Amino acid sequence: MTTVPAQAAPATCRHCGLPAADGEEFCCTGCAGAHALIHEMGLDAYYARREAAAPPATTAEDSAILDLANATQALPGGDCQMRLVVDGLTCGACVWLIESALRREGDVLDARVNLTTRRLSLRWHGDADRANQFAAILRRLGYRPAVPGAEGADAPQARSERELVRCMALAGFSAMNIMLLSVSVWSGHAGSMGEATRTLMHWLSALIAIPTVAYAGRPFFRSAITALRAGRTNMDVPISLGVTLATVVSLWETMRHGQHAYFDGAVMLLFFLLIGRFLDARARGRARSAAEHLLALGRTPVMVLGEDGHAAPMPPAQVAVGAQVLVAAGERIGIDGVVSQGTSDIDTAVVTGESNPQPATVGDRVFAGMVNLSAPLRLTVTARGEDTLLAEIVRLMEASEQGRARFVALADRVARNYTPVVHLAALGTFLTWVFLAGLEWQQALFIAVSVLIITCPCALALAVPAVQVVASGRLLRGGVLLKSPTALERLAKVDTIVFDKTGTLTLGRPELRPDATCAPADLVLAASLARASRHPLSRALARAAGPGPVAEGVREIPGAGLEWDGPEGLVRLGRRGFVGPVPAPAAVAEGPELWLARPGRPPLLFRFDDAPRADAVTVLAALRQRGYAIALLSGDRTEVVSAMADRMGIQDWRGGVDPAGKAAALAAMRAEGRHVLMVGDGLNDAAALAAADVSLSPSSAVDVAQTAADAIFQGEALTPVVELLDVSRKAERLVAQNLGFSLLYNLCAVPIAMLGHATPLIAAIAMSSSSLVVLGNALRLSRKKEGPTA
């Protein structure tokens, strides 16, 4: 037996348990700081410190906490479940703090927080009234809980942008007025303005500048204070320090009737910083719009049919499983369900990436987010809210966006040590200009302030996450879901692609060939075993036989078939070799097949037709054109695999390979130094998918959460394979460009600022521009060229 080397377990943060880069103990600086504080002061003291530092609750927060009826759900067995939106999350340390604080309560069974969408899922045993107490715990820790879908609950980005706009408007208005006063002072220096008049102009500027800085600087001050309270620093600390120092020094100069005051520079500095922060927020919102858009699709109200025959609108989260829902033509579906009445065309693009409408009739499954196009349908609800396929897709996106690949670790390591280095550089600059160059301390301080501002690591911090998020959004629109946070990085290195045949190069929906020699009783027996399996051939056999019972005690042997201890003995359904000797004439059979073996009777053959994907030949040609080596490994018979390889133009192929053989073949390729992508059925090729450097699986919508691959693609087209590889290569280039630009910017900007050639105003413009350049470069990835040969 060949032993397949297991993949190394992904690194996790010592503090919060979220994914961490290889060789890293913590996922972020917040976790590193919190872990050190807990080690120093103890867990209970840390909780007390967080509660003491929390801001007081507001009326809006109280109302959000008290009205939890729509967020709490009773479960069987006396359990309750609640889902909330939690505002104020910043890093993995926040996730750990909330989860650990809630789990300290004796009746809490599970508490999970998603950092990207700020969703808390809490389950406990006992009274539903405990929901208010759990929400109060969140508030005491400094977070604002709210009911999903409630007014303001899902709009933190909008609230932040509105605050930035108000602050930006005030700073701009004040800067223009102070500039008019400053022009008078500048012109007065060249004329006959006296000291009293100049001081008056400075005081008027101070009266405008000080309230402006206090109000418009809140986004930076609040973030800096929060970080310092937690015993750490962030990029807003040097910004806040720079703005405050510029204002305080100007006020000191005014009080002592000095000639130079820089209120205009301080307010203009704040104005440009706010412009950069606002554009940054808008760009981040655009990059992250894919997940938020999907979440919005799942909130579409549905028309629930009551027992009296009347339909009434209801939020999807309140609809009971098993309820009857009416969906009008042109309406978006808000729940997962099965069509119980009607026939229509469904736009499935949001789930499968398929652009052509798909027919739906009685018995077909539909999912939240799809659009009913042509005729009314009645659905039986099978899932709602967080249990829908749409919610699962969002969770997969979030998992991929929260991961930490090699470039992320590099950027974080630099940014983690960046702030103390910047502070030391600014202090060294100040001391050098004062004691070695003999400059006045006020002017030296402004040079140090410029150093603080121009070296803010915003661009470096955005270099990798911006590309990851834009790439995830683009791939989602193309029907590809990333399940692994490091998948894009590994895909960029791929040079060999190995395909499975059934369900990958083919549609995976084989149809049973009619056979007049097959007795109805034999088909019924075979179907009773087949209904216990999810294999495509088993499904096709069960579909051809129609509704019926499932045999109890069926055992599935991966890569071989099914076996069942029947009344007459062991019954097997599967591939030849597994069921025993087969008749010689059947050796020339072509196409997929299953054999049924029963005691005392000759094996019975079931033949199937499985059409290849329509664009398979074009996609494989496009991949070869891009320089990839193509191979085909299949468990099907050699004759069938040979015919498929000839049809697809594949030279390197093997047939009759079981799952262990596939895994061994992939391990051998990796031992040769090749970087292998395995594209195969995620339901029964788990070992092969794990043995490859990176794996991709085609999957029907219902199987999205069940595959073992790093990424999955939806729909009948194979084109997403090309799209995924193209995006990964371009993402790798953009990440390298962003990191290179960020480092080059700082190498050039720091000496300029330290030499005194950059005022605080110029430093603010340069720092904001560097962040926007990085974001703009990342957003280039959202542009898509059509066709597999792009």
Image (tube, grey):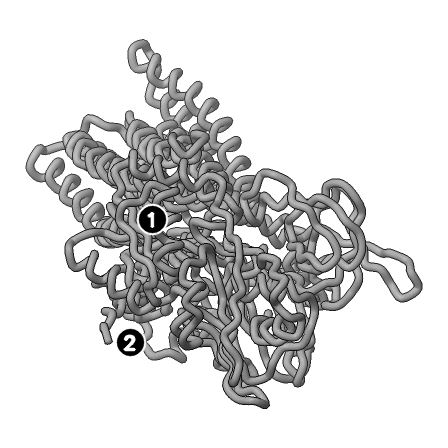
| Neighbours of disc 1 within 10 Å: few (<14), some (14-19), many (20+) | many
Q: Are marks 2 and 1 in contact (CB under 8 Å)?
A: no
Crowding at mark 2 (Cα within 10 Å: few <14, some 14-19, many 20+): few
Residue shown at 33% from the left, 70% from the top: 15
Find the residue positioned furthest to the top: 191
Q: Is residue 764 visible?
A: no
> Of 781 and 617, which appears nearest the observer?
617
Residue nearest the observer in this picture, 48 or 398: 398
Q: Nearer the viewer, residue 430 or 232?
A: 232
Q: Amino acid at mark 1?
A: Leu
Which of discs 2 and 1 lies nearer the camera? The answer is 1
x, y percentage for residue 666?
A: 26, 59
Q: Which residue is mark 1?
A: 488
- Label located before the other in sequence (2 or 1): 2
- The residue carrying mark 2 is 39
Q: Which quadrant is the N terminus positioned in?
A: bottom left
Q: Residue furthest left?
A: 436
Q: Position of residue 542 (x, y in %)?
A: 61, 66
Residue at figure coordinates x 37%, y 33% from the top left? 772
Identify the residue at image location x=47%, y=32%: 171
At which x and y percent is residue 536? 52, 61
**Amino acid type, label 2:** His
> Mark 1 falls on what kind of element?
helix
Vertical order, 192 against 754 (above or below): above
**Considering the image in quadrants, where does the C terminus appear?**
top left
* 164 horizontally vs 236: left or right: right
Quarter assignment of residue 341: bottom right
Residue at x 41%, y 34% (from the top left corner): 788
Residue 439 visible to an observer of this rendering: yes
Q: Position of residue 37 (x, y in %)?
A: 31, 71
